[in-house]
Amino acid sequence: MFKIFDAFKQGKSLASSTTWKNVQIATNALACVLGVGVYILQMFVDIHITNEQILTLSGGIAAIVNVVITIITSDKVGLPNKENN
């Protein structure tokens, strides 16, 4: 169950980092599309969301995904690994 958290430890990384980097790129693109899509949608439909909320939502999604994927695809960064100390 907790094996997934091993990828967040410094000195560990996922074997298929190329695949995960592609996921990172796709998620960034989708976050942009989400922001633009909601912005365009509010021109035609009365939804109660401000431009700042749209930017916060799409930017937050991109930021979280970037941090997680950067950590799990690199063995140089991450949480301290007690095994290496």
Image (cartoon, rainbow, N blue to C red):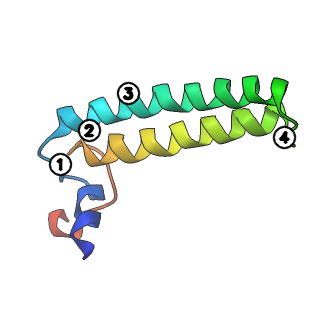
Labels 1, 4: front one: 4
Labels 4, 2: front one: 4
Return the disc, 1 or 2, that comes first in the chain's sequence: 1
Please state, as top left, top right, bottom left or bottom right, where the C terminus lies in the image.
bottom left
Quickly name the residue at label 4. Answer: 47
Pointer 3 with pointer 1, Cβ within 8 A = no
Return the disc, 4 or 3, that comes first in the chain's sequence: 3
Q: Could you say which disc has been placed on residue 25 in the image?
A: 3
Residue occupying the point 19% across, 32% down: 18
Quickly name the residue at label 2. Answer: 20
Return the disc, 2 or 3, that comes first in the chain's sequence: 2
Residue at the far bottom: name it.
1
What is the quadrant of residue 80 in the picture? bottom left
Q: How far apart are marks 4 and 3 (CA)?
A: 29 Å
Whether residue 38 is situated above or below residue 49 in the rendered picture = above
- Classify mark 1: helix, strand or loop: loop
- Classify mark 4: helix, strand or loop: loop
Q: Please tell me how crowded label 1 is: few (under 14), some (14-19), or many (20+) other residues with Cα within 10 Å.
A: some
Given the image, on which type of amino acid does mark 3 rest?
Ile
Q: What percent of the width, then of the height, locates residue 17?
A: 19, 38
